[in-house]
Amino acid sequence: MAGLKEGGGRPAGQRKAAAERPEGGRASTTHRRGRGAGGEKSTPCGATLALRRDRAGRSPARASTWAGAPAHRAQAPSLRLRRREKHTRTRAQARRPQAVQPHLRKCFDNLVKLKFVSDKGADISGMISGEGEEVPFYKPLKARGNVEKWLLDVEDWMCKTVHHICKEGLKAYPEQARRDWVREREAQTVSSIGMVMWCADAEAALMSDKNRVEQMKIFYQQNVTQLTELTELVRGKLTSIQRKSIVALVTQDVHNRDIVETMCIKQCQNLLDFSWQQQLRYYWGGESAEDDLVYKQVDAMGIYGYEYMGAGTRLVITPLTDRCWMTITGALHIKLGAAPAGERVGALHRDQPSLPGTPELQNRACHVGRRRGV
């Protein structure tokens, strides 16, 4: 046939391409056609050759972007953009901070959008959750320089802002009616500071100079009254964010009411009673953290992680949830981690204390480094 010579009956063009291929090179296994009579390997298909030409002819700017991507990812562990194309696209638009918005879901738990002062500016004034809750930063942040650097500043600002709003919520709690307080505060503040105040009232009853069993019964009635007020509040006119915040608080308060009821039945009269010590408890300040939110459970103690959680929903808290909390806080206390899995236990990602982030023990645990400086 025309165009065929010795060497396996292949066209001269293919033999030439095979000869030019570097020693030890392999054709794609998808397109390998076996060996010819002359023992030569077949050449790659046209698509593979085109891909090689594209790599060889890549522009210097694009090539340098690809080459530097691993180093930049190492500088910003929070920027977990798994696909190199997305990371490259984000870095290529470094002068346009708004370009990072689609990727924030991969970097944070529920910070899905940043609020910029203007469409073309680089000043960030707040953060927005997946539910649409908007929380202003404690002070404006300027997105300057490489994206992997100012994203770390965003993380720092997020933690300091959550610390700030929790502290403000704690100050405002005694000065307002509870039904007004829960409507005006952020969902995360309502959940975390609500737990702080519940623990303070419970321990006041357990340390009372009067009959402590009777004081616990009075505290139980206080819990029932607060739940009734929240039920009436939910039936009224609320915004979507307020409703989600209050419904989550109702779930939390129902669990707290059941705890107090159990302690009344067991006639718990001491802070060291295991019926109280086994509970997940929240305090503002502690032995090693004078100006921080602290969680305690049995022997475990840690500082709240201040990761922004938004206004997510909560599943009902069951005895299994309590056991998971105890296991996780114990693991974190001895510098280990925890990763609950499954339909029910997976909800602990939302329903746990914020060792790394919320009054709901986030099981991505082990971002125990706290942010201070507010």
Image (spheres, rainbow, N blue to C red):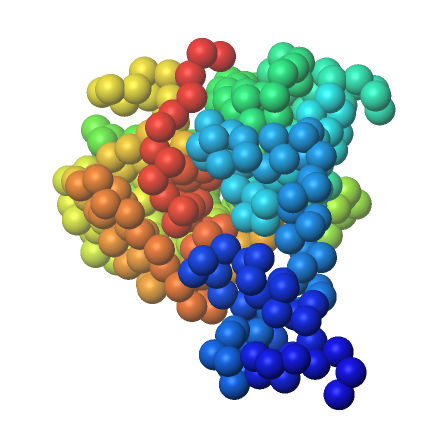
Q: Which residue is more in the foreground, 39 or 155?
A: 39
Q: Check the picture and name the quadrant holding the N terminus.
A: bottom right
Q: Quadrant of residue 128?
A: top right
225 vs 52, left or right, is left
Q: Which residue is more in the foreground, 244 or 329?
A: 329
Q: Where in the figure is residue 8, as x and y percent of width and height?
A: 57, 83
Count of numbered badges drawn on the protein: 0
Q: Where in the figure is residue 110, as x and y percent of width and height?
A: 59, 42
| Residue found at the far right of this picture | 119
Decide: is 357 above or below 258: above
Q: Where in the figure is residue 222, as x and y percent of width and height?
A: 45, 42
Q: Where in the figure is residue 356, as x and y percent of width and height?
A: 40, 37
Q: Quadrant of residue 269?
A: top left
**x 70%, y 20%: residue:** 124
| Residue found at the far bottom of this picture | 1
53 vs 25, left or right, is right
**x 63%, y 64%: residue:** 16
Q: Which residue is more in the foreground, 121 or 264?
A: 121
Residue 77 visible within the image:
yes
Residue 257 visible within the image:
no
**x 22%, y 20%: residue:** 287
55 vs 328, left or right, is right
**x 65%, y 46%: residue:** 55
Decide: is 217 above or below 79: below
Decide: is 148 above or below 312: above
